[in-house]
Amino acid sequence: MASEIPHSFVKRSSHKKRIEALAVNLFRQMTYLVILAAAYIFVDITINGSKAVFQSTAPYVNVQFLTDKPQTLHVFEPRETYETMQQVRSQILVLETKNRGLGESDPELSNSYAQQIKALDAQYESLDAQRKETRLKYSDREYRALEVSPDLSNYKHDTYAYSGGGIGPAIIGTCLLVLGSIAIALVLGLLCAVYLSEYSRPGKILQAVRLSILNLSGVPSIVFGLFGFGMFVLFFGWGVSLIAGWFTLAIMALPVIITASEESMRAIPRGFREGALALGATKWTSVRTNVLPYALPGILTSSIMGIARVAGETAPIMFTAAYALRDQLPWEGLEHPSDFLFQGVMALPYHIYVVSSKIPQNEYTRDMQYGTAFVFLLIVGFFALTSILLRIRVRSKYKW
Amino acid sequence: MSAEKKVHPKQADFHRKRAIAFGKDSDSIIKAFFGSSATIAIVVLGLITLFLFKEGAGFLKLYHTSLKEYRLSGLEYVDILKEKRDDYTALSRYLTDIRADWINHLKDSGMSAKEIAVTVRTPEAKAFFMGYMRNGSEMRRFIKEKMDVAIEIRDQHTTNKNLGDTLANYTKKIEAVKNPNYILNEEDRARFILLLKESLNNGEISIEVRTERQFRYGELEQETPLEASDLLLYLQLLEEQYNATERKIKPIDFDMAVLEVTSNYDIYAEILRKQALSIQVALAHAEALNFSHPELAQRVLRFKELNELYFDSNDAHLEKLAQWDPSAKTLFLRTLASFLMGKEWITASDQQDWYGLLPLLVGSLLISVIALFFAIPFGVGAAIYVNQIASPLERNLIKPYIEFVSAIPSVVIGFFGVVVFGEAIRLFSQLDFLSWMPFFPIQERLNAFTAGCLLALMAIPTIFTLAEDAINNIPRHFKEASYAVGATQLQTTLRVIVPTALSGIISAVMLGFGRVIGETMVVLLCAGNRITIPDFSEGIGVFFQPVHTMTGIIAQEMGEVVHGSVHYRALFMVGIVLFFISLIINYSAQWVVKKYRKVGD
C-alpha cells in the first residue's frame, strides 16, 4: 500500500474527511435551499403576474391595467355550455366512483371506465375552450355603457369586485406615500446622523439616543400603525390622509436612514475634517464642505433601502392613509389645494391585502391578483436592487 | 465678551467668534440644533409610549365596569348554569359518535343498508339513543329563559346609561338657551326645525299649540329668519324632549332584578334530579344491546362512567350556584388578570364580551416557534457557509441576494401563502405515504404551520445578516491559530469560530424572533385567524391548527371598532403588550452581546 503513495502530502481519503465533506455539503445545501425558496416566490409571481401586465400585441404592456381604476368585472358565460359542462363533470364523477368501487376485481370493466372518463375529459376540455371563446367580459364602465345588456336567459351573469380595470390609483398612491415619507425621513435622519457622527461626545445622552434608535428599529410595524392612528389621525385630527401616512412611514424608516447615514459619514477619514479645521474653517464649515459631499452618495444609496422598506409596509398605512377603493385620483375633485394632503389614497400593498383576503381566487380574479403583486414586487425590487448595486459601486469607488 | 470686543477695534487672529444669539456663537448654535434633532429617536419612542397608553389606558376601567355589570346582572350566574348544559351537550355528542361508529362497523361487517336500519332502530336501541338525547330539552329551556332575563337586565342598564348621557346633553343645552343673551345659530335652527317637526306627531299637545307650531314650521321651511319669540318655543321643545327621554329611563335595581335570575333554584335542582333519573333509565337499555364489537362495548362503558361523573358533579354545581353572590366585589386586579390571562377573546356578542390575551399570545408564540425552528438552522447555517466555506464569488453573489430577499414585502409573501403555499401544504399532507402521521391530512390550508414557514423565510435574512456580521468580526488570528495546531476547516468553524461568535449569533436569533412576532401581514393572511387556544393535546398536530395572533387581531379589527369603546381600547392594550415585548427582545439582544462578548475591542 505504502508504495502507491508518491509523496507524503498527497490527499488521502479518510473517514473523518468524508464526514467533513458531508458537513460542508450540508451547509451548502441549506444555503441553496433558502436561495431556491426565495427564487421560487419570485419566479411564480413573475410568471403569473406577467400575464396581467404584458400582452402579446403592441405596445406589449397592458397600459389599461397599469393606469385604469379598479372596477367590478362583469362576466357573462353562455348558459348552455355551462350546463353541459356541469353534466359532463357529474358524469365523470359518477364513473370515477364506480371505478373506485370496482377495485381490482374486474380489470376489463375498469379499463372501459377509464376510457370513458378519458373521452369525457376531452369533451370537457373542448367545452371549456368554447366557453372561454364565447363568454363576455365587461368592466363596470363598459357594462354601464352597454345599450343592450346580454340576454340573461342565454347567459349566466357573475360579478367579481376589483377584477376589472386596473391598479393605476394604487400605483400613484404608493409613489406619493413613498416620496413624501422618504423626504421627511431623510431630513430628520440626516440631522440626527450629523450630530451622532460629528458633534456627539460619549455620555449618557448619546447612549440614550443610540438605545432608542436600536429599539425603534425593532418596534413592530403594526405598533407604528397604532401610534400613527392615535397621534396623527385622531389627536391631530388629520383623518385618514396622505400626510398622516407620510409621517407614520417616515418614523418607521428613520432608524434605517440614521444608521446608514452615520455609517457613511464615519467612513470619511479624519484627515478631511482636520485639513479643513487646520485652514481655519469652523466645525460646521468643515462638515458642510468636507464631510457631507463625500458622504452623500453613501447616504443616498442606503436611503434607497429605506425606501424599499417603506414601500413594502402595509400595517402602518392600514388605518392611517390607505383606502380600499377610491374613485378619484389624488388630484381630482379638490376644493382647496391643501385638501391634497388630507385625503386618503389607495396603495398597492393594501390593495394586495384586500384582493387576496376579501375576494375569492378563481380564473377571473387570479390574473389581477398576481399582476398587482408582480407590479408591487417590481417597484420594491427595483429600489432594493438599485440600492444594493449602487452601494457596491460606491464602496469600491470611494476608498480612502 | 461683546463688551470686550468693542474696546479692541482690530480683532486678534485667534479671537473667539462673535455671539449671535443667547450669548452663543454660530457654531454652538449649530451644534445645539443638531443635538436637539438627534433626540428625535427618544422623542418618538416617548410619543409612541404616550399615545399607546393614552388610547389604551381607559381599557381597564371600562372592562372593569363591564365585568361588574356581568356579575350584577346575573350573566355570571347564567354562565355557571351553561357549564352544566355544555357538559350534557358534550355527552350527547359522544353518544352520537358511538352511534355513527356502530353503523360504520355494521357496514364493514357486510350488512346491507336495510339490515342496518333494522338493527339500529330496534325498540331497545331507540330507547337508549333517543331516550338519552331527549333529556336535555327541559334544562335547555330553563337556562335559555334565565339567560334572556339576565341579558335584558344588562341591556336595560346600558340603555339607561346612554339615555343619562343624552339627558346631560339636553340639560347643558337648556341651560345655555335659558341665558337671555343667547343667539340662535345655524345648528340651532336645524335642530329647532327638526324638533318642531317631531313635536307635530306628539299626541299629548293641544290642538291650538299644534296648529301654531305647524304654522311656524311651514314658515321656517320657507327660509324665514328666526325671531326672538322662537327662543321660547325652542326652550319649550327642548324641555319636552328632556321629559320624554327621562320617561324612557327605567331604573334598574340590580339587587331586585337579579333575584329573577337566581329564583327557581329548587325547580332547577328538580330538573337536574329528574334528568339524572331518566338518563339512568335510558342507560339501562344499553344492557340489552349487542354491539358485536369489543371497542364499541368499551366506549359504551366509558360513556356510562362519564355519565356517573356528570351526576356526581350535580351537587357541586348546585352548591356553586347557591354560593354565587351578585354583590361580591369585582377586584381591579382580577380585571387585569382576565385581560392578561383570559382564555377567550369574544367581541360583539349579545351576552358578555371577553378580552383575553392568551389565545392571541399563544398563537403568536406558536407561529414564532415554527418560524424559528426553520429559520435558526437555515439562517445560521447559511451565515457559516457564506463566511467560512463559500468561495469569494459565491459570497459576493449570495450576500446581496439575501439582502434583496429581506426587501420582499411581507404582503407579497402573504399573498403567495394564500394562493400557492397553503394549497401546496394541504396537497402534500394528503399524500398516501404520509398517512401514518396522526394529524395528516390537515383540514385547513391556512394554519400556523403555513404562516410559520413563510415567516421563517422573512426571519432568515435578518438572522443571516446579523450572524454573518458576528462571525465576520472574529479576528483572523483565531482561525489561523486553530489551523496552526492542525484543526480541519470544519473543526475550526464549529469549535472555534461559532463559540466565539455565539453571543452575536444569539442576539441575531433574538432579533429574528422580534421580527417574527411583530410581523403582521403574513399572519393576517395565512394563519387562519381562528381565535381559540390551539389544542395542545394533539401533539405535533397543534402546529397545523388555525390560530390568531396579536398583530393580526389589531390589523383585522381596528378598522371596524367604534372609537373609544372597550374593544377599541383592548386593541391598543394588545399594541402595548406587543410594544413592550419588542422592547424587551431588543434590549436583551443587546445585553447578550455586551455581557458575553469574548473578543475585546
Image (cartoon, coloured by chain):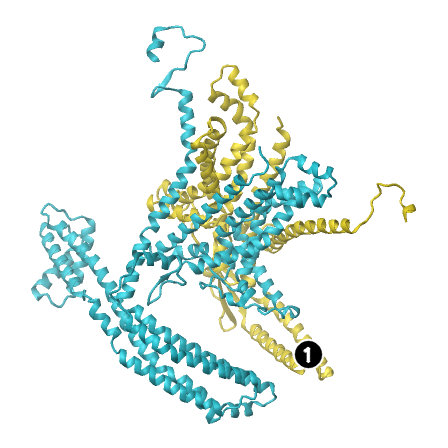
Question: Relative to the observer, which residue lies in front, A75 or B561?
Answer: B561
Tell me the shade of chain A: yellow
Residue A284 to residue B542: above or below: above
The residue at which mark 1 appears reads as A116
Count up the numbered dots: 1
Q: Quadrant of residue A120?
A: bottom right
Q: Is residue B442 above or below residue B185?
A: below
Chain letter for the cyan colouring in the rendering:
B
Q: Is residue A6 left or right of residue B485?
A: right
Point 52% across, 32% down: residue: A262
Which residue corresponds to the image point at 53% horizontal and 25% vertical from the top-left? A291
User: What is the x, y in percent for residue A41?
Assistant: 61, 53
Q: Amino acid at mark 1?
A: Gln
Instruction: Kindly identify which chain the residue marked by label 1 belongs to.
Output: A
Q: Is residue B124 visible?
A: yes
Q: Residues within 10 Å of mark 1 (few under 14, many from 20)?
A: some
> Which corner quadrant holds the C terminus of chain A?
top right
Q: Position of residue A99 (x, y in %)?
A: 66, 80
How far across and how far down the image is residue B104, in percent? 56, 83
Label 1 secondary element: helix
On the question of residue A163 being in view, the answer is no
**In the image shown, does A62 or A347 lie closer to the viewer?**
A347
Question: Where in the figure is residue B67, as x and y percent of width and height?
Answer: 30, 62
Task: Give the residue furthest to the right.
Answer: A3
Q: Give the quadrant of residue A300.
A: top right
Q: Residue furthest front?
A: B485
Q: In the figure, residue B152 lies in which quadrant?
A: bottom left
> Would you place residue B519 above or below residue A308 in this image?
below
Residue B534 lies left or right of residue B239; in this view the side is right
